[in-house]
Amino acid sequence: MLFQRTHPVIGLDIGSSAIKLLQLKPSKKGYVLEKFGIKTIDPELIVDGAIMDAGRVVDAVKDLLREQAVKVKDVVISVSGHSVIVKKISLPPMTEDELEESIKWEAEQYIPFDVNDVNIDFHILPPGDAAGDGKETMTVVLVAVKKDRLAEYTSLVMEAGLNPVVVDVDAFTLENLYGMEYDVSPSEVVALVNIGASVMNIHIIKGGNFSFTRDISTGGNRYTEMIQRDLNVSYEAAEQAKRGESVAGVSSEALDGIIATMNGELVAEIGRSFDYFRSTSTQETIDRVLLGGGTAKVPGLVPFMNERLGVPVDVLDPFRKIQVNSKLVDPDLLKAVGPQAAVVVGLAIRRPDDR
């Protein structure tokens, strides 16, 4: 087991706008960044998490592996969106072995798919998170992922010459990252919000333990689509404008209006999720928000969230405790990418024997 713990893996985040690859090496002080690469892909290759053109995505992964001279074959990937169901449920006390035997039948009442069409996993939360007095029930996080979506992603990385050893869920990679990079307070309720191109993950934890999660099918692509449509510009020009770069013929006033509208839509969705969490939890307050994903860098989003949500909002820094050798990885690239690497860092710290 000790060998397996130190066995190297790469994290591979296959997003709908970019593929990120990252390899970490454990050290006495934590982790050293060995390899990091990112490759933008055309928006039609992956739509709502479904791979529309596997051949071109495989080519993009192979290009990244070649560019980074990756020798490691074991890879950790993740999935998110409508094909993933995460529920916190209360069950009678039982051992992990007993739960392993009965989880399929317990899951049937909680998931909207045929239980034979999904892969199921679970995690028993510490007693302090149990419902009631903690004596008569235990709290379990139930995770179900559609088999066809899992097969889609595992087949893709295998075709690229890799060996998938762990398949995680995007939201839980954020929890892994938070536990490694931030000082966890036992009583603090933190919302980890990762806004990618097409999916927004909202993952709320208390004292580092799972409390609530939700995936919403919206993200940075909505800004791009609206800028394209309203300002009549190309996809590439809309992407540039979204990032705050000047684009010929684009009025800054018109652009600011579009971004403000989209900021409002996204934050309203986040606010509704927070309200739902408060209504179903004894925790009435969220103490802070950490914002990840490429959309975190949209101009004005962070102060807008601060004001509308009434909660301190900071941008997630996936590299804050990772040692970086500037000869191996360009620090300017890490600074430019920043929160977009949140999921891939969370993947790279996973190991095959983790639970």
Image: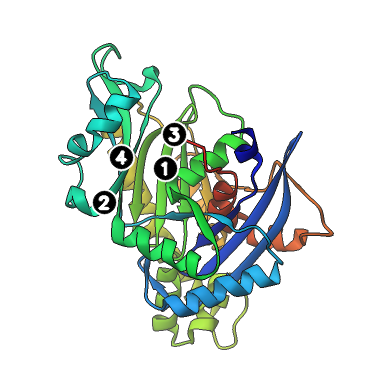
N-term mark: 3 or 2: 2
Q: Nearer the viewer, residue 137 or 331?
A: 137
Q: Judging from the image, what secondary structure is the residue with disc 3 in? A: strand
Please indicate, yes or no, whether residue 308 appears anywhere in the rendered image: no
Name the residue beneath numbered marker 4. Answer: 275
- Which quadrant of the view contains residue 280? top left
Mark pair 2, 1: CA separation: 22 Å
Q: Residues within 10 Å of mark 2 (few under 14, many from 20)?
A: many
Say whether disc 3 or disc 4 marks the residue closer to the N-terminus: 3
Of labels 3 and 4, the one closer to you: 3
First reached walking from the N terminus: tag 2 or tag 4: 2
Please, what is the three-letter code of the amino acid marked with disc 1? His
Nearest the viewer among 247 and 126 is 126
User: Please, what is the three-letter code of the amino acid marked with disc 3?
Assistant: Ile
Q: Residue at x 48, y 87 (%)?
A: 233
Q: Residues within 10 Å of mark 4 (few under 14, many from 20)?
A: some
Q: Residue placed at 62% from the left, 48% from the top? A: 318
**Residue 227's spot in the image, x, y percent?**
45, 77
Residue 278 circle label: none
Which residue position is annotated with label 1? 203
Q: Which residue is mark 2?
A: 118
Q: Quadrant of the N terminus?
A: top right
Amino acid at dot 4 = Asp
Q: Amino acid type of disc 2?
A: Val
Question: In the picture provided, is 332 more to the left or to the right than 188?
Answer: right
* Residue in the image at 17% along x and 41% along y: 108
Crowd around label 1: few <14 · some 14–19 · many ≥20 (10 Å) = many
Mark pair 1, 4: CA separation: 14 Å
Can you tell which of label 3 and label 2 is closer to the viewer?
A: 2
Residue corresponding to mark 3: 205
Along the line of sight, which residue is nearer the eye, 21 or 102? 102
Whole-angstrom CA distance, mark 3 to mark 1, is: 7 Å
